[in-house]
Image (cartoon, rainbow, N blue to C red):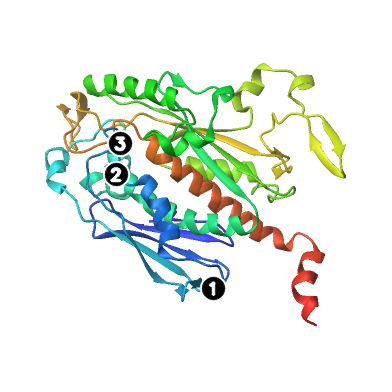
Amino acid sequence: MAGSTYGTSFTVTTWGESHGPAIGVVIDGCPAGLPLVKDDIQKFLNRRKPGQSKFTTARKESDQVEILSGVFEGHTTGTPISLMVRNIDQRSRDYSQIKNCYRPGHADFTFDAKYGLRDYRGGGRTSGRETIGRVSAGAVASKILGHLGIRITAYTKSIGTVTVPESEYDYNCINNNPLYMPNNEYAKAASLYLEDCMINQDSSGGIIECVIDGMPAGIGEPVFKKLDALLSQAVMSIGAVKGVEIGDGFLVSHTKGSKNNDAFYSENGQILKRTNHSGGTLGGLSDGNRIILRAAIKPTPSISQEQETVDIQGNTTHITITGRHDPVIVPRAVVVVESMAAITVADLLMDNMSAKIEYLEKIYLKNL
């Protein structure tokens, strides 16, 4: 299988299946000397692990990370960092009844079409547990960005019909409710909506918003490695994501240039913008403003309602999916979106070190 590696200078390769012995990631290109301990990574993994509320799968996984290489005495060594999380609560028997059917909304059919075989236990490589590797790598990338004064914040903007308006944001609430919404009252309303979905054996989608603060201007690599293009690719590669927008996104199709253009002005020697419709990017490069992106997350495809499908011979049949599944993917995907954004920004920051000769001079001439 190709396509399991992301990045150019800071590369991330994820491995493992939902019901295999373990899942993990190999990170290459992390600079030596970065302070890094197990807890730096575990804090991120704890935000995506199952069993945190009634709105997540009941699968009991502690998701304890093991650092296998690349770290010595609390600091990165510059060599590949290998991280692993063992699977301890697989119930493969839950999938034995559907191994010969194609589940609606899943990758069963497409994997058979591509490879001629598939790991049907929990979705194998297409399971949400694959994101463990992404989140582990995102924790390392975020540690790098923190040293550079760059902060990434992601949260649930909407679930189903419940949307938090920007005027009601309170970032202090994000970690104080199980849905990771920036407003506790809206989180309560979303919880009631999800309870109704569960009563009806159904699931819900939603929107995750991610903001990046502290980005310097000029980060990105035109033409095919633009900042917004790679952020979109990174977030779109998450299994449940069906749409990504930057800044005003699709709303720009309903406006005019006179309103959509962000006017520049100068203050204290800095070039600033009066608005941020562009979402912090111009021409595929960061413009120094807050970067804003949103990801549309589809409803969990594993629902307990009876659904029409076909078996592997093409015969019409019906299935009822049992097992342990999230009624909504959004809350656990918040940290995944944040992690993919961090990986992308860290990678592009490293690429940018060769953009000007003066950058190389600062590194190499000071010691000559």
| Of residues 296 and 342, the one drawn nearer to the viewer in this rendering | 342
Q: Is residue 16 left or right of residue 288?
A: left
Q: Is residue 65 visible?
A: yes
Q: Is residue 192 left or right of residue 163?
A: left
Name which residue lies at 76% across and 69% down.
360
The residue where tag 3 is placed is 106
- Measuring from the top left, give residue 218's x and y in whole percent: 74, 49
Kindly indicate the quadrant of the structure image that contains residue 16.
bottom left
- What whole-number distance in Å separates the C-alpha atoms at marks 3 and 1? 38 Å
Mark 2: few/some/many CA within 10 Å (<14, 14-19, 20+): many
Provide the secondary structure element on which disc 3 rests.
Answer: loop
The residue where tag 1 is placed is 78
Q: Is residue 32 left or right of residue 110?
A: right
Mark 3: few/some/many CA within 10 Å (<14, 14-19, 20+): some
Provide the secondary structure element on which disc 1 rests.
Answer: loop
Amino acid marked by disc 3 = His
Q: Is residue 237 visible?
A: no
Q: Which mark is residue 348?
A: none
Provide the secondary structure element on which disc 2 rests.
Answer: loop
The quarter in which the C terminus is drawn is bottom right
The residue where tag 2 is placed is 50
Name which residue lies at 80% across and 76% down.
365
The quarter in which the N terminus is drawn is bottom left
- Of circles 3 and 1, which is in front? 1
- Measuring from the top left, give residue 310's x and y in whole percent: 20, 30
Name which residue lies at 19% across and 50% down.
90
| Of residues 187 and 29, the one drawn nearer to the viewer in this rendering | 187
- What whole-number distance in Å separates the C-alpha atoms at marks 2 and 3? 20 Å
Q: Is residue 229 left or right of residue 337?
A: right
Amino acid marked by disc 1 = Gly
